[in-house]
Structure formats: C-alpha cells, structure tokens
Image: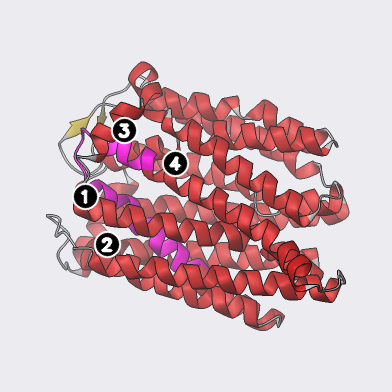
Amino acid sequence: MVRAYIDKYRQFSVNARIFFLATSIARFANGAFTAIYNIYLLGAGVPVSIIALLATVRLVAGSASSLPAGLVSDRLGYRRVIIASSILVLLTQIGKVTTLSPGLLMGLALFEGAATTSRQIARAPFLAANSGNEERTHLFSSLAAASNFTNMIGSTVGGFLPALFIAYLGLSGSIGVEVMTMRWTLLLASGVSALSVLPLFKLEDLQIEGTTAVGRSHLKIQLKQLASSGAVRALVITNALVGLGAGMVIPLFNVFLTEHLGATTPQVGTIMAVSSVTLTVATLLGPTLVENLGKVRTVAYCQLASLPFMIGMGFVPILPVVAVSSWLRSSSMNMANPVQDAFTMEIVPDESRATVSSLIRMGRSLARAFGVSLAGYMMEHISYQSPYMVAVFIYALSSTWFLLAFSGKHHRKAGCSSSTSP
C-alpha cells in the first residue's frame, strides 16, 4: 500500500503538491485552534448556548454563501477563491482571540463561515482539475490522511501548550491564568495559519472548458439542469443528512467531554489527537477498499460501520470507553470521505464541479447548523446523551439512501452526455 502511494505521489502535479503543503500547515494550525477554543470560551465565561449559537451562525453563513461561492469559483477560477478565503479565515481567527464580545463574535462567525465554505467548495474541483483518473483517488485520500495527521499534531500541541506555559513560566493555576495561556496558544495557532497562506500564491489557475464568464440566462439553465439530475439530488440530500447528524455530535464534543465526563483540557487534546491518528491510517485504506468494493459501497459501508461506536460515545459514561469509541467512529465514518469527494467530481460536468460542490455544501451546512443548535438545546434541557440517539438514526438513513441511490448503476454526468462508472 505504501509503495502504491509513493508511485502515485510521483504522478501528482506541481499544483497538487503545493496545495498539499499549504493544506497540511493549515490543518496543523486548525487542530491547535479548535482543540481548545470552545474550552477557552467556557473558561472566559461564555455560556454553552452562546457557543452553540456561534457554531450555528457560522454554519448558516456558510450555507448562504455556498451557491455564490460555487458560481464564482467556476467563473473566476479556483485559485483566486482559495487564496482570498484562506486570508479571510486567518483574519477571523485573529479576531476570535482578541474579543469576547458576543456581537463581534457573531460577526466574525459570519465571515468565517463564508470564507471556510468558499475554500472548501473550491478545494475538490481544484484537485480534480489538477489530477487524472488514475491518481485522483490516491490524491484525495493522501491529502485527507496528511490533513488528519497534521491536525493530530496540532491538537496535541494545542491541548498541552497552556499547561506547559503555566508550568515553565511558574504561573498560578487559576482560571484567569488558564484562559490567558489558552489565548496565547490560540494566537500562536493563528500565526501558523498565516504561514499556510504563503504557498498558495505559487499555485497556477487552470482554465477549465466551460468556466469562462457566462450570462445570467446560462447560469439559470445550468442550475435547472443540475436540479433535474437525480444524482445531484441524491448527493445533496444524503450529504445534508450527514451534516445534520454531524451537527448533533461533533461541534460540541469537547463540551460533552469536559462538562459531562469531567475531562481535562490535556485529555481533550489527546483524545482529538489520537482520533486524527486513527483516521489518518484508516483514510489510507480507502483506495484498497475501492478496488474491492467500488466507491459507492465503500462510502456506505464505512458510514454504517460507525454507528455502534457512536452509541458507545453517547451512552457509556466512562471516559476511556468514550475516547476509544470516538476514535473508531471518526475513522469508520470519515475514512471514505475522500472517496466520496472523488466520486462526486467524476459524475458531474467539469464546468459545474464547484457549483455542485456548493449545492452539497449548502445542504450540509444548513442541516449541520440546525443540528448543532438543536444539540445545544437538548444538552441544556434534556440530557448530554440525547443528541447521540438522534444522530445514530440520521446516519443510518443517510448511508442507506446513498447505497440505494448509487449502487449498481452506471451514472451519466449531470447535464451532459458523458458517463462514468462508480
């Protein structure tokens, strides 16, 4: 398997390698930042309901900007969108550390949601445009694995740096000091994010046929064609269900660990870090599974395999069990994400890749925004375990729907005459 990845890496384009480097650095910074940011807000006196609301605002903003971001990416080029959105994400990170005003945090969440979504929408089409069919699955999988690995390193650093600051600087262990050291860590993570932007300026934008500026009438025709495609509808719906389930669990998982199970900040950082390690290894198995099962069954079976572990996360109140369950759930649920991304890019027209990506992202983000808001309410008014029960059912429905929609079929590219096999 390792030899296969080495051989495929040699086939990656210069653009793909540059993006690989920039993404790895950005994921390190993101891991350090996200591992402690919610805990930082809790320590600073921000209620759980406000933290959940910030996540909701961020996701709603991302959803609202999804379709415009996709259209802009298809018309102006993926490189420009990736660079501009990466710079905006950096600025919002710095802003989030320098203020605790709920109003300002809401505004920053709006910009962060739009920028993050724009970058993610342009990513898959950019990689698809800079890869061939032979190495595409390996490119998507290896980038995901590298991102998870560097995210793991970042989560470890982010979880332990505040305690190291306190120990080596001889500071007291009061709540105020802990919040201060977490703020230092978040600022350092933002500095690393700035470094991740620099390689992006070396990227070259490829002009894909059909992506030149077009009139409004053409855009309406394009959207109508995509909306009439059963494949696109199925992709949007199943991804929206995944987003809803993820919103019920993922954004507030560190809150679940600290408030419900009494985990410490280093423990949270370690749990998130090990999760990235297991996911890194699992992701590399994607191409092997595709060779034996095909893309569709690989995606569906991996997602279904995650359900028992989600039950373990939510309903066994023992921290080691929850930790192991979270690692296995994350690995099985997400290991096929690169495969699904590659599959999606293969069954849609080249000139509509970013637009379809935006539709999927919009559905997923809206559902996730609703899910995290509902989860925050359920945690405060019902129980910390209740969101997990709902998420299990939603994930099961999504995986089954995806399998039934695409398994054993030969799909035509939406809106065009060419076709590919899953």
Q: Residue at x 63, y 77 (%)?
A: 97
Kindly identify the amino acid type of the residue bearing the numbered disc 2: Tyr
| 20 versus 337 height, above or below | below
Crowding around mark 2 (Cα neighbors within 10 Å: few <14, some 14 to 19, many 20+) is many
Kindly identify the amino acid type of the residue bearing the numbered disc 1: Ala
- Does residue 131 show up magenta in the picture? yes
Q: Specify whether residue 412 is in view.
A: no
Query: In the visual, does 123 lie left or right of 16?
Result: right
Q: Alpha carbon of mark 1 to alpha carbon of mark 3: how far?
A: 20 Å
Query: In the visual, does 174 lie left or right of 75?
Result: right
Q: Alpha carbon of mark 2 to alpha carbon of mark 1: how far?
A: 10 Å
- Does residue 321 show up magenta in the picture? no
Residue beneath disc 2: 78
Kindly identify the amino acid type of the residue bearing the numbered disc 4: Ala
Classify mark 4: helix, strand or loop.
Answer: helix
Span of residues in magenta: 113-142
Residue beneath disc 3: 5
Question: Which of pointers 3 and 2 lies earlier in the amino acid sequence?
Answer: 3
Question: Which of pointers 4 and 1 lies earlier in the amino acid sequence?
Answer: 1
Q: Nearer the viewer, mark 3 or mark 2?
A: 3
Q: Alpha carbon of mark 4 to alpha carbon of mark 3: how far?
A: 11 Å
Residue beneath disc 1: 129
Classify mark 3: helix, strand or loop.
Answer: helix
Residue beneath disc 4: 145
Question: Do the CB atoms of the residues marked 2 and 1 lie less than 8 Å apart?
Answer: yes
Q: Nearer the viewer, mark 4 or mark 2?
A: 4
| 323 versus 16 height, above or below | above
Q: Residue at x 63, y 31 (%)?
A: 328
Question: Which of pointers 4 and 2 lies earlier in the amino acid sequence?
Answer: 2
| 138 versus 90 height, above or below | above
Foreground: 100 or 321? 321
